[in-house]
Image: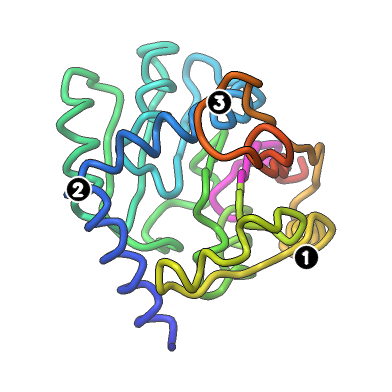
Amino acid sequence: MDEHETREKVRELFDEWALSGRAEGMERGHGPAATQAFARLGLEAGQRYLDVGCGNGYTVRWAADLDPAIEAVGLDVSGEMIAVARERSEERGNARFIQAPFPLPELRSGAFDAIFSMEVFYYLPDLAAGLSEVRRLLMPGGRFACVVDYFAENAASHPWPEEVGVPMNLLSEGEWRQAMADAGLEVLEQTRLLAPADAEGEAWKREVGSLLTFARRPA
C-alpha cells in the first residue's frame, strides 16, 4: 500500500467513526491520557497551539478556553471529524480547523509554540517526515507532546492494524525516542500515562498506559 492509499484508508476509517458517533467515545477514552499530556505543554496567553489529528477538536477547545489570546488550530485528514469539531467550537473565535493530511507544507515554519498529538503518528506513512515537520513548525524552544497507545510494549495493541485494515508503525519506547532525536527534537520526558483505577475501558489503559514522548525543538 503506497502513501496515498494509506492516507485514504485512514481518512475513510475516521470519517466512518465520526459518522457513527465514535468521536465522542474517543474523547472519553483518550481523555485521561490527553489531559495529562496537554498540561505539560504549559500554554500561555499569546501562544499558538496545533493539534495534529484533532478528531472532534476537544484539545483545541481546551487550548482556546485557557485564554482568548491563544490561537488554537486543529488539523485532521477526516472531513467528517473536522465538521464535528467546527460545529462544537463555533462559539470560540480563537479556534479554527483545517481538513488536510499531515504533513501540510502550507503551514508556516516556526508558527507554533506547542504541538499535541493523540493516537496519530503511528498512522503516518512516513513517520520520519512527520516528525521532521513537527520540528519545522515549532518555534525554537517549542514543545511537542506525542501520545500513542500502539507501541511495542503494549501487547494488547498489536492486533489493531489487522482489525481496522490500516497499516501502522509499531515502535518500542526506545525507537520513539530515537525517531524524535533523528528528527532534531530533544526528548525531555518519556513516560506511561495511566488511566485512573476506576476508569472505563480495557485493563491495559490502567496497567500499561499510553506512551507519552514529550520533546522540544532546541533553542
Residue 159 shown left or right of residue 208 in the figure: left
Span highlighted in magenta in the image = 136-147
Among numbered discs 2 and 3, the one appearing first in the sequence: 2
x, y percent for residue 205: 63, 37
Q: Type of residue at label 1?
A: Asp
Residue toward you, 191 or 90: 191
Report the disc number at residue 32.
Answer: 3
Between the C-alphas of marks 1 and 2, the distance is 38 Å
Q: Quadrant of the C terminus?
A: top right
Is 179 covered by the magenta stretch? no
Q: Please name which of the two marks, 1 or 3, marks the residue nearer to the observer.
A: 3
Among numbered discs 1 and 3, the one appearing first in the sequence: 3
Among numbered discs 1 and 2, the one appearing first in the sequence: 2
Is 143 covered by the magenta stretch? yes
Between the C-alphas of marks 1 and 3, the distance is 29 Å
Callout 2: helix, strand or loop? loop
| Prevailing secondary structure class for the magenta stretch in the rendered image | strand
Residue 165 shown left or right of residue 154 in the figure: left
What residue is shown at x 45% (from left), y 63% (from top)? 103
What residue is shown at x 43% (from left), y 88% (from top)? 1
How packed mark 2 is, by other alpha carbons closer than 10 Å (few <14, some 14-19, many 20 or more), is few
x, y percent for residue 29: 46, 34
Q: Which residue in the protein does label 1 denote?
A: 182
What residue is shown at x 65% (from left), y 37% (from top)? 142
Q: Residue furthest bottom?
A: 1
Callout 1: helix, strand or loop? helix
Q: Which residue in the protein does label 2 denote?
A: 20
